[in-house]
Image: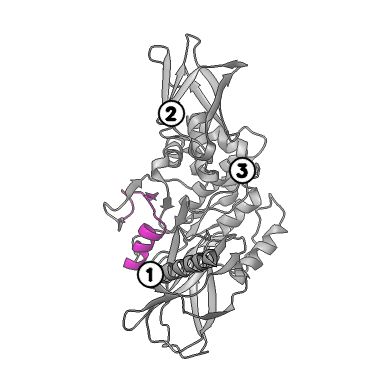
Amino acid sequence: MKRCFIKSTAIILIISLWAALCSCSPFGSSLDVKINSPTETVDIVSPEIRDYISRAKNYKEGDYTSSVKAYDNLGNMPSSVKFEWTFSKDLNIVNAYFIFSETKDFKVTQKEYIPKIHTPTKDKKQTATIYNLKPDTTYYYKIEVEEKGGKTSESKVFTLKTLSGPYILEISGVNNARDIGGYKTDDRKTIKYGRVYRSANLDLATDIGEDYILNTLGIKTEFDLRNEYTESFRSPFESSLNYINIAGKSYAAFWENYETAAEEARVFANPENYPIIFHCAAGADRTGSLAFALEALCGVSENDMIIDYELTPKRSRAGYKTDKYNYDFPAFITALRSFEGENLKDKVYNFFKDKCGLSDMELYNITALLTTDGAVFKNPPSSPIKSNGNKATVEIDAKKSGEIKSITANGKEYDFTYKNGILTIKTSNEGVINATLSFEDGTKMPIAFE
């Protein structure tokens, strides 16, 4: 009997403690919400873009005589989800938010303000359109409200899965903005979302747009491809982020200006620059040429790269001329096909290596940063690492690749140490050694030293 009494008392104490902890929480759990839509799976890509992709996939690869675009403004049709829900009781709301997370524990969240919410009465339909959820992503979300009097409460957690597709962004004051992520590569990887964005110029970004770029996207680098001597422009961010300006080239001229192409590519080889947003004036020609080269380097299919190019307003695979400009996309492809290599991926790789002088280590970094969470060089060497006292050193961020397993070249293993991000290789007087650095997760990193 005594044992039962002790057990009952313990249960009561646990329940009381739980209730006390709950009462200290700033959130109540009494917000009863019924979500009418979306269902668990939602397509955030506009019907016009879906129609274009459907047509483009049946289009003959290598034919640049015409386009299948039925709509010209696809790049300004941002992704959105329309929510419809009801509250179970009358509320006097001051502010309301959707709280999104890609994990059940909500450790990393995205908080979206719900504008123009009506003072809800029981069972009255509420609607809100939320922009810029990522495609091909499972989200966990809940509604949080602040009522008059200071009470804050939230709903239970709901889930939704977005379908894959182009990730067009709504950024206030900025046109033609999208994430280049989501495209599959030939080695079964995918360009990661949240690494690199492309857009038209950022000069007219509103305060809301600037805040979104800095604080939601977390952009570290604005990469401006405009020419400071022939174009009038400004960056709205001043010292808020890293600003890089390189006068870019477009179409066939992209492949003819090796030094400029090398400078552009090296922006994406530096992990300190990420996340990056790059643009020219319209985000079309210089931006489109560089985006195509980056995607090809990663092994994206030709058709997908052309789809990405044609999402841009007024741009077509057929190209066209005006009295002032020549948007010659076919010439861009023809010039690319002239380089050595079995496919476009090889041709772009050989272009950057043989024509532009990028090292295998720099090119590795670009593709690794765009498509993996694995090991990268902190500052990729542009030439073989020189030995100092029979030791060659380089900084490496192993990330999720785990431990370094071996360094091999021509069947020989080299002794090394790896501590606090510094890799030290024991060398000898053998000249330049082009080796492979192998990691625990199977990552293979090219490394050259002498």
Mark 2: amino acid? Pro
* Of marks 1 and 3, the one in the foreground: 1
Residue 381 is marked as 2
Q: Which mark is residue 299?
A: 3
Q: Residues within 10 Å of mark 3 (few under 14, many from 20)?
A: many
Q: Earlier in the sequence, mark 1 or mark 2?
A: 1
Which badge, 2 or 3, is on the more N-terminal residue? Answer: 3
Q: Earlier in the sequence, mark 1 or mark 3?
A: 1
Separation (CA) of disc 1 from disc 3: 49 Å
Seen from the viewer's position, the closer of residues 445 and 292 is 445
Please report the bounds of the magenta region as a residue range.
Answer: 207-234
Residue 338: image quadrant is: top right
**Dot 3 amino acid type:** Gly
Q: Mark 2 Cα within 10 Å, few/some/many (few <14, many 20+)?
A: some
Cα gap from disc 2 to disc 3, whole angstroms: 23 Å
Q: Nearer the viewer, residue 326 or 49?
A: 49
Q: Which residue is drawn at the image coordinates 54% and 76% (left, top)?
A: 82
In the image: residue 150, left or right of residue 370: left
Residue 385 lies, in percent from the top left, at 43, 21
Q: Viewed as shown, does residue 165 lie left or right of 385?
A: right
Is 313 magenta? The answer is: no
The mark lying in front, picked from 1 and 2, is 1
The residue wearing badge 1 is 25
